[in-house]
Image: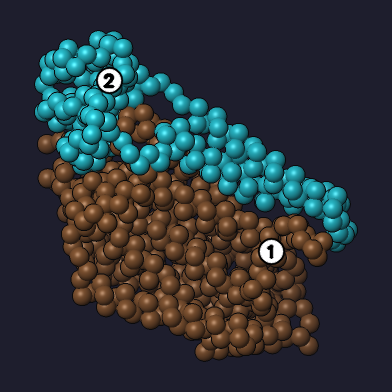
Chain colours: A brown, B cyan
Amino acid sequence: MTEPHHMPLIEPGHTHATVTDKIAAIVLERGVSKGWILGFFVAFSLFNVLALSVAYLVYKGLGIWGINNPVGWGFAIVNFVWWVGIGHAGTLISAILLLLRQEWRTSINRFAEAMTLFAVSCAGIFPLIHVGRPWVAYWLLPYPNTMSMWPQFRSPLLWDVFAVSTYATVSALFWYVGLIPDLATLRDRAKNRLVQIVYGVMALGWTGSAKHWFRYETAYLLLAGLATPLVISVHSVVSFDFAVSVIPGWHTTVFPPYFVAGAIFSGFAMVLTLTIPIRKIYGLEDFITMRHLDNMAKVMLATGLIVGYGYLMEAFMAWYSGSPYEQFMIWNRLTGPYAVPYAGLLLCNIVIPQVLWSGRVRRNIPLLFVISIIVNIGMWLERFIIVVTSLHRDYLPSSWGMYYPTIWDWATFAGSIGLFLTLLFLFIRVLPMISIFEMRLLVPANRKENAP
Amino acid sequence: MSRRLHGLLAEFDTAEQLLAAAEKVRAAGYRQIDAHSPFPVHGLAEAVGFQRTILPALVLLGGLMGAAVGFGMQYYISVIDYPLNIGGRPLNSWPQFIPVTFELAVLFAAGTAVLGMLALNGLPKPYNPLFNVERFALASHDRFFLAIEATDPQFDPVKTRRLLESLQPHGVYEVED
């Protein structure tokens, strides 16, 4: 059996032309398949569930959700953190792995960046609808107004507004810049006049000039350098929403690194969940090879261990602090009314991913797919536990309560998955899901060490 | 319709040939030249006489401006225009202004990187005479092109063509405006 690090990034026999043909043909020549229509139909139906849920929320108010006093942050915040976290793997793959010269990122970066963008779109909805009156959500922004009021810049919730909107903007820019040369390829290959015009407009007149490439690569590297601290800051700020408060279980310094690791953990799980079926359906096994799956599984294992360390530190600090409230919080998590989801998260995030130590498991594609879904569920449970268990029993027993999600909570969550999948289906159909120009750099003609 | 010669375009099979050709054409004294390839080729920009870009400096400026705008905005709002006592903290509680300052620095820097790259490259440019050459569509596929513009003082339709043909290209084409 070939060791994974000897496995090729791209199967032998490919040239500049075949790489281009294969990826561009998915968009230009493959047409709309029945499977795509069916998938899109399901995704779009789910998206309509979101539209309906939000419409009913606006009509009726936040009472349709299970939130109450004391649990004011229910599914909305759970889903927000979950989606933002998923997005982070895309930036990690596109920016951090670029700076670390990890060439294997090439065939998955476009796709992962798209995932980032769509996950952030889903994430952004939740805080906006959670404010209760989404039609005045723009009050979050600092703008001169007739009320003579300004936002409060000492609150992490406002930092979030800036962090997430900057993140969404920079991710979109990074993604689009990466697309420009490939849009030019599509423009030059399209047969249909209308398609030529659309891609032509989006390609901005790209000609592959050496001078343009020079500035382009400079800009791309700078963007990667900017996106790297950005992605870490974003999830740190998200963790500040919790850590800056004085609620037991939230007020802890381990939150920023532990949240960032958790974000990458769940994000890689989502990349695996998506790429495993897509590489099969679109016959991209030549480009997304076993080596990619193996590497992603390893990143998942490593970040999962950091998350495990975070759980351990939460418990340790609760004990070490000597604070009865912190100690009760951990005890309540382990044995209280939410003990089952807590056990589930330990199982999904800590216990099950340990099988990834085995190379045989990492190279068993169906099993890897199942594990990636388990991790997605586990990370969702983690956010649920963090949000709900700390709030439902804090200092005064007289203000304790329970949180039970309603049908509308579930519908909104399911609907956000629908939005995510709808965008993903459209992306796969109209844009090259693998960076063509970067793949050209990987073909044997450009890599002396790979030449026979 | 009047057809004016914009320049000459030579097509090559490999990046190495293009690089060698660019160096020879430049050594022959041509300056209004450019190379077109389906992916960035190391050293090609230098071969056509392009040394450096001011883009990194612009991005630094953009980032500094974003930081200044971010901090300045928060200072103005929280200290001057709308002072609020939050838990007895000083009005200029600067550590709490760092996250937004940082985010705006990144936002401005990234915006400068993208807009600056496009502006310096003269994009978007919907019409380019090179697009009139049918084979040029392959510049985004697997072919490599070297263009010499007619505005180059050395340019001569016959001599320049002869020079390009001596470089063993796949073909030499006239580019019309």
Q: Residue A133, image x and y in percent?
A: 66, 76
Q: Considering depth in this image, is A91 or A164 the residue closer to the camera?
A: A164
At mark 1, the secondary structure is helix
Q: Quadrant of residue A371?
A: bottom left
Q: Residue B147, image x and y in percent?
A: 25, 25
Q: Considering depth in this image, is A406 or A345 the residue closer to the camera?
A: A406
Q: Considering depth in this image, is B150 or B66 the residue closer to the camera?
A: B150
Label 2 crowd bin: few (<14), some (14–19), many (20+), radius 10 Å? some
* Residue A414 in view, yes or no: no
Residue A151 as seen in the image, left or right of residue B151: right
Subunit ID for the residue under disc 1? A
Label 1 crowd bin: few (<14), some (14–19), many (20+), radius 10 Å? some
- Position of A448 relative to A335 (above/below): above
Q: Quadrant of the N terminus of chain B?
A: top left
Q: Residue A77, image x and y in percent?
A: 59, 72
Residue A140 is labelled as 1
Residue A111 as seen in the image, left or right of residue B9: right
Mark-to-mark CA distance, 1 and 2: 56 Å
Q: Quadrant of residue B6?
A: top left
Q: Residue at x 75, y 44 (%)?
A: B72
Q: Residue at x 45, y 83 (%)?
A: A49
Amino acid, disc 2: Ala
Residue A13 as seen in the image, left or right of residue B27: left
* Residue A135 in view, yes or no: yes
Subunit ID for the residue under disc 2? B
- Position of A86 relative to A434 (above/below): below
Amino acid, disc 1: Leu
- Position of A52 relative to A224 (above/below): below
| Residue at the spot of label 2 | B150
At mark 2, the secondary structure is loop
Q: Residue A297, image x and y in percent?
A: 35, 59
